Image (cartoon, rainbow, N blue to C red):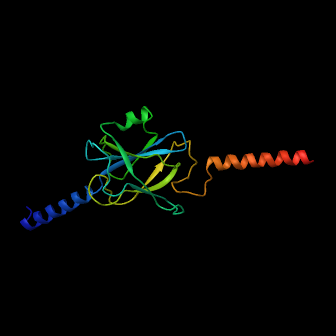
Amino acid sequence: MFSKKTLISGAFAAAALLSTTAQAHLVSFGWTDNMDGTVTLWGEHWHGDQTSSFSDNGGITITDTSGTISPYTVQWNGVLNNRDRDDMLADGTLTGWDYAGNGLAEHRDWFYTDALVIGNGDWNFFTGTRCCVDTMSAPVTVTLTGITSVGAGTGPGDTSVPEPTSVALFGLGLIGMGIARRKKA
C-alpha cells in the first residue's frame, strides 16, 4: 500500500500537471482564404459559448519560423459557437486547420480575427500565458496550406512583397516606356 505521504505528494503532482495542462485553452487554429489577398484566422477554445470576442493576451502574435518578419499581432473580432471543424471545412468556412498542441479533442467554439495578409508556410502563433480564454503555455508552429490568394511565405507586416497595385503601375510604366521607345525609333 501507499503511505499517506506518497498519496499527498501524488495529489500535489497531479494538481500541478492539471494546472499546467489547463494553461493551454486553445485547441486548434484554423484559417480561411478570403480569395481577395487576405486570410481570416480562427482559434478553437475550451470555454464553451462566448457572447463576444476578447483576449486575455492581446490576440495572436505571429512570427515566421526563420525570424525574418517582425512579430505581428492580430486581434480576435468575433465568435462562432457550436460549429464542427469538419462541417466548417466542408462548407468553406475554413480552408484548413492545425492543432495548437493541446490534444485531439474538438470543442466547437471559435474566435476569429480581422482579415490579414498571410500565405502558406510554417508560422509561429502565440496568444500568451495569461489565463483564461485564449491561453497558451508556449508558441506553436502552425502550417498554413490551401491559401491561393496570397503568395506562399508572405506574412503580416512583410514589406518585401510589393502590393498588387505597385506591381501593376510598374508594369504600365514599362509598357509606356516601350511604346515611347518604338515611337522614337
Task: Tell me: 68 left or right of 168.
Answer: left
Q: State whether residue 123 is above or below residue 8.
A: above
Assign the N terminus to one quadrant of the image. Answer: bottom left
What residue sits 22% from the left and 59% below the top? 19
What residue sits 56% from the left and 46% below the top? 150
Query: Residue 112 falls in which quadrant of the image?
Result: top left
Where residue 11 sits: x, y (%)?
14, 61
Where residue 155 sits: x, y (%)?
52, 54
Where residue 133 sits: x, y (%)?
28, 52
What residue sits 39% from the left and 52% below the top? 75
Q: State whether residue 18 is above or below residue 97.
A: below
What count of labels does the image hold? 0
175 and 3: which is toward the camera: 175
Query: Residue 4 falls in which quadrant of the image?
Result: bottom left
Residue at the extreme right of the image, as rendered = 185
Where residue 118 sits: x, y (%)?
51, 50
Task: Tell me: 120 left or right of 73.
Answer: right
Residue at the extreme top of the image, as rendered = 91
